[in-house]
Image (cartoon, grey):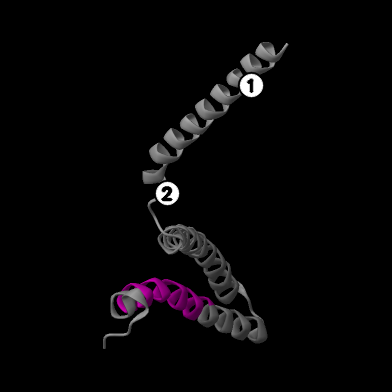
Amino acid sequence: MVKQGKKGGDRLETAYWSLVGVASAVILSVQPVFADTIWDRFSKIMKDVYGQVVGISTIVAVTVAAIALIVRMVSRNQRAVDEATAWLKRIVVTWIVLNSLGFIVAYLQPLITGGNYSG
């Protein structure tokens, strides 16, 4: 009886060390995948999100500006014309601000790399 228990224990020990070896191999082979820091990954995600927002905002701005221009051209009511003009100004300013954010961040990022302002 004692020999059977020990034989089963040897199998369990062998299985355990095999599992440890496989887990170590997986960790060592996956390490290069996780080489980016969390801030590098966050930066990539934010650039992607910003690109999508700018693309969508451009389409929406053109569509709403076209509607405002049509209202401004067709309407006989002076109040509607004034409101359409105000909306056009808001649309243009908002679109310029959204598109300028990427330029500002791209310009300021080299100045403050690593959290140390070198200017």
Query: Which is in the foreground here, disc 1 or disc 2?
Result: 1
- Three-letter code, disc 2: Phe
Please tell me which residue is depicted at 40% across the width and 40% down the height of the picture: 28
Q: Which mark is residue 34?
A: 2
- Amino acid type indicated by mark 1: Gly
Instruction: Locate residue 80, reporting x and y percent.
Output: 65, 81
Point 53% across, 70% down: residue = 65
| Residue 17 magenta-highlighted | no
| Chain-order first, disc 1 or disc 2 | 1
Q: Identify the magenta region.
A: 91-108
Q: CA distance from mark 1 to mark 2?
A: 37 Å
Q: Which residue is mark 1?
A: 9
Residue visible at 27% across and 85% down in the picture: 118
Residue 38 x/y as whole percent: 46, 60
Crowd band around label 2 with a 10 angstrom C-alpha radius: few (<14), some (14–19), many (20+): few
Question: Dot 2: what SS?
Answer: helix
As drawn, 55 above or below 114: above
